[in-house]
Image: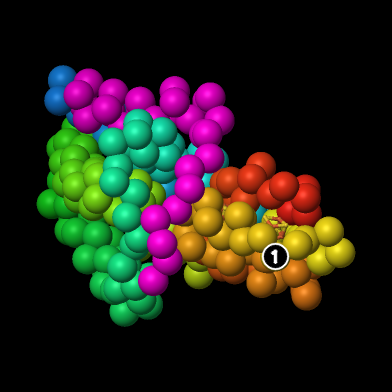
Amino acid sequence: MAQTRLAVKPQTYKYILGVLPFIIIIAGQMYPLLGLIIFGCMVLAIGVSFFRGRYFCGNLCPRGALYETYLKRLSRNKAVPEIFDRTWFRVLWVFFLMGMMTFRIYQSGGDLSVLGSAMIQMIMMTVFIAVLLGLYYDSRVWCRFCPMGTMTNWIGGGRDPIAIDAHSCIDCTKCSSVCPMDIQAYEYKHIGEVEHRDCIKCEACVVSCPKKSLSA
Ligand code: SF4
Ligand code: SF4
C-alpha cells in the first residue's frame, strides 16, 4: 500500500470545472433537464478514450476536478486501500451503476424530466460516496473504481501515454509520490512511455519531476 502522497497545485480551470457538480445538483432540483448533461459527459469520456485513454478523467471531468481541487484541501489524503483497485470491485461498480441507470431510463418511460431527475439523484448518491471516501483517503479515490474510468480504461487505457526519458531520470520517485492513481511512472523508463491503463494524464508527475524527464 502506498504512503500518503504529496499534492501538486491543480490548474486554475479545474476550480471552475469543479463547481459544475454543485450547480447541476442544486439547480437540477428546479430544472431537472440539467441532469441530462451527465449523458453528454459520458459520451465525451467514451469518445476521448478511443484516442487518449483516461484523459477525460484527469482533465475534463467536473467530478474529478471537484475532488482534485476543493476536496483535496479537506482530505486527510491517506493511502488508498488495494481493494479499490481490484478488478472484481471495479466490475461490480460498473454493473451496479450501469444497471441502475438502465433501470431508471426504463422507468422514466421516455419522460426527459423524470430521467433528468433520476440522473441527478444518481450523481448526488455517487458524489456523496466519493466525498465521504475522499475526505479520508486520497481525494481522487473515487477515480480508482468510477465506472466511467473503468470503461474508458477498457476502451483506450494506455493510449497517448506520458513519455519518460530514461537518461535523465534519477529514480528519485517524486513522480510516484504525487500520482493520484499510485502509478510508479519511473518504472516505465525502460520502455520510454508510462503505459499504465489507468493513467489519467493529470500531469502531476510531469510538473513535479526535478529532471524534466516526463512529458505529455
Ligand atoms: S520524478 Fe523524474 S527523475 Fe524522479 S524518478 Fe520520476 S521521472 Fe525519474
Ligand atoms: S502517471 Fe502521471 S499523468 Fe498518469 S495519473 Fe499518475 S501523475 Fe497523472
Residue at image mark 1: 171
| Nearer to me, 60 or 195 | 195
147 in magenta: no
Relative placement, left or right, of 189 versus 64 is: right
Give the amino acid type for the residue marked by disc 1 in the picture: Asp
Q: Is residue 14 left or right of residue 115?
A: right
Q: Quadrant of ligand 2?
A: bottom right
Relative height, residue 1 to residue 177 (above, below):
below
* Residue 176 percent location from the top left of the image: 56, 60
Q: Is residue 27 shown in magenta?
A: yes
Q: Secondary structure at mark 1?
A: loop
What residue sits 28% from the left and 61% below the top?
98
How many circles with numbers are drawn on the protein?
1
Residue 145: quadrant of the picture: bottom left
Q: Position of residue 152 (x, y in %)?
A: 50, 60
Pointer 1 local density, CA inside 10 Å: few below 14, some 14–19, many at least 20: few
Residue 163 position by quadrant: bottom right
User: Which residue of the protein is positioned furthest toward the right in this rendering?
Assistant: 167
Residue 125 to residue 149: above or below: above
Q: Position of residue 5 (x, y in %)?
A: 45, 53
Please state which of residues 113 and 41 is positioned toward the viewer in this rendering.
41
| x 54%, y 64%: residue | 183
Q: Is mark 1 within 8 Å of ligand 1?
A: yes
Q: Residue furthest bottom?
A: 88
Image side of residue 37 versus residue 14, left or right: left
- Residue drawn 75% across the image and 62% down it: 170
**Boundaries of the magenta span:** 1-28
Residue 108 x %, y %: 15, 46
> Which residue is located at x 70 percent, y 71 percent?
188
Whether residue 122 is visible: no
Q: Can residue 183 be seen by looking at this rendering?
A: yes
